[in-house]
Amino acid sequence: SREEVLKATPNLPPAPKSWPKQTPTTPTTVKVGPEREVLFLSDQMGIKLNRGTDGIVRVMSVSEIQPGSSILRKGKVAAGDLVREVCGVDLRRPITATMWGDTVALIKMTPRPVSFIVAEEVTPNAFPASPRAPQSSSPRPTAAEI
């Protein structure tokens, strides 16, 4: 059995009595409008994403595309939108800080074009869209400018 192997193996620290909680601390029911696809064609995406304390990924800010800008995208994305899917990764459920870090790395490494599925949040008292992401005591950053 696993316990016998652990007891017989020297130099292993004891197994923790409980594992660290990786799920969001507050259960959330998020209501969303219709989902829509946004296709990012350039390396510069001109958006800032944030994984909130509820584990949900939101668009915090969107740069306007100016004439001559290096940002190329097809579709509408707005501050406050919920990110439902990125590069085929389903973000419709709350994600952990580790999953968030992996998702940001995947977005940055994926060759363009990159597909996002986003939706407007229609939950009453939804998180307000803000140009500044809330600070977190988490060792991993919760906001990513892409």
Image: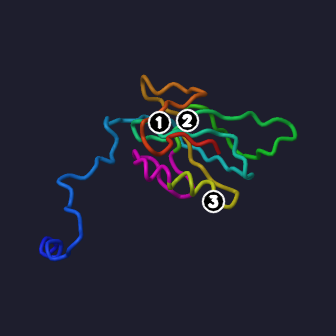
Distance of mark 3 from mark 1, alpha carbons?
28 Å
Q: Is residue 10 above or below residue 100?
A: below
Q: Please state the extent of the stretch shown in magenta in the rendering.
A: 84-101
Q: Which residue is rendered at x = 47% and y = 27% of the image?
A: 127
Q: Secondary structure at mark 2?
A: loop
Task: Describe residue 53's horizontal placement relative to residue 47 as left or right.
Answer: left
Residue that badge 1 annotates: 32
Residue 142 within the segment the image draws in magenta? no
Distance of mark 3 from mark 2, alpha carbons?
23 Å
Residue that badge 2 annotates: 81
Residue at the outermost right position = 68
Q: Secondary structure at mark 1?
A: strand
Earlier residue among tags 2 and 1: 1
Instruction: Choose mark 3 or mark 2, whichever is in front.
Output: 3
Residue 32, given in percent of the width and then of the height, sits at 47, 36
Residue that badge 3 annotates: 109
Task: Describe residue 37's horizontal placement relative to residue 27 as left or right.
Answer: right
Amino acid type assigned to the residue bearing label 1 in the image:
Val
